[in-house]
Amino acid sequence: MRIDIITCLPSLLVSPFAHSILKRAQDKKIVEVIVHDLRDYATDKHKKIDDYAFGGEAGMVLMIEPIALLINQLKKERIYDEIIYMTPDGVQMNQNIVNQLSLLKNIIILCGHYKGVDQRVRDIFITKEISIGDYVLSGGELAAAVLTDAIIRLIPNVLSDETSALTDTFQDDLLAPPVYTRPANFEGYQVPDVLLSGDHNKISEWRENISMQRTKEKRPDLWEKIIKE
Ligand code: 6GU
C-alpha cells in the first residue's frame, strides 16, 4: 500500500512513522508513506500557500493552486482509490472505516490547517472526508497520523502475531479483556487464577465474559448495538 500525505507542516509527521510497528512496516516495504510539503508546490514567487478568506471571515485558508498542482501530479503517476481530507466536519472515523481503507492500494491524505482549505479543493478532488472525533485540533496532521497508524497495523504481515489485530478492542465491537504479565503477585494484587490455570477453554470463556461485562459497563452505546444485532 502507498499512502501520500499532503501537509504544510511535514515535520509534525516524521516521528509518528519513525518507530516500532510503523517503521518496521515501511522497512519491510509492506507500506510506503510519503509526506509532501505543500510549500514545495507554491505557484507564486513568495511560496504562498494560504490567503485571506473571501467575505471577511477571520483566519487563513489553504489555496487551491499548490494542492491542485501536487494532486494532479500524483494522479498522473498512479490511480488513487481515495483522496481523503482530514477535517473536523468529516465522517467520524471508526474501526469499520479503517478496515475498509486498509484494503486499498493507493490513497492520498490531505491535512487541513488554519481555517481549512478552499472549498473547491473538496469539491474537485476529495472523495472522503474524515474526522477523528468531536473536538477541534489545530491542524489535520495529528489526525492523519492517527488514521494512518490505524490503517497500517491492519495490513497483512505488519503485526508479527497475525491474529492480534483480530482480537483488538472494536474489531468485534467488544472492548478487549484485561491482560497481565509477571509478577503473578504484586504487593498482594493477584493475577486472576484462571489465567495461570493452563486451561485454554476456561481462559477463552473468562476473556469473553469479561469483555462483555466491560463493554456493558464502560460503553453501553456499543452494548446496545451488539444485543440488537
Ligand atoms: Cl481531521 N482535523 C482537525 N483540525 N480537527 C479535528 C479533526 C481533524 N478531527 C477531529 N478534530
Image: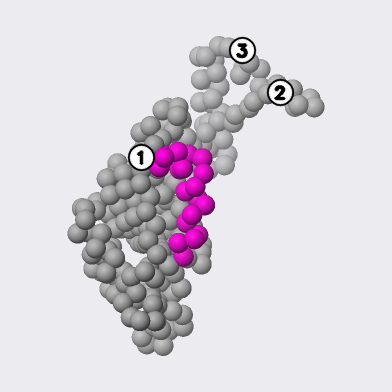
Does ligand 1 reach within 8 Å of label 2's beta carbon? no
Quadrant of the drawing holding the N terminus: top left
Q: Where is mark 3, residue-wise?
A: 197
Q: Where is mark 1, residue-wise?
A: 29
Which of pointers 1 and 2 lies earlier in the amino acid sequence?
Answer: 1
Q: Amino acid at mark 1?
A: Lys
Quadrant of the drawing holding the C terminus: top left
Answer with the quarter of the image where residue 217 lies. top right
Where is residue 206? Give x, y as percent: 55, 22
Q: Where is mark 2, residue-wise?
A: 183
Q: Which residue is found at the position 52% from the left and 52% from the top? A: 15
Along the line of sight, the residue nearer the viewer: 41 or 6: 41
Q: Amino acid at mark 3?
A: Ser
> Residue 90 has which mark?
none
Q: Which residue is found at the position 50% from the left and 14% from the top? A: 201
- Mark 3 vs mark 1, foreground winner is 1
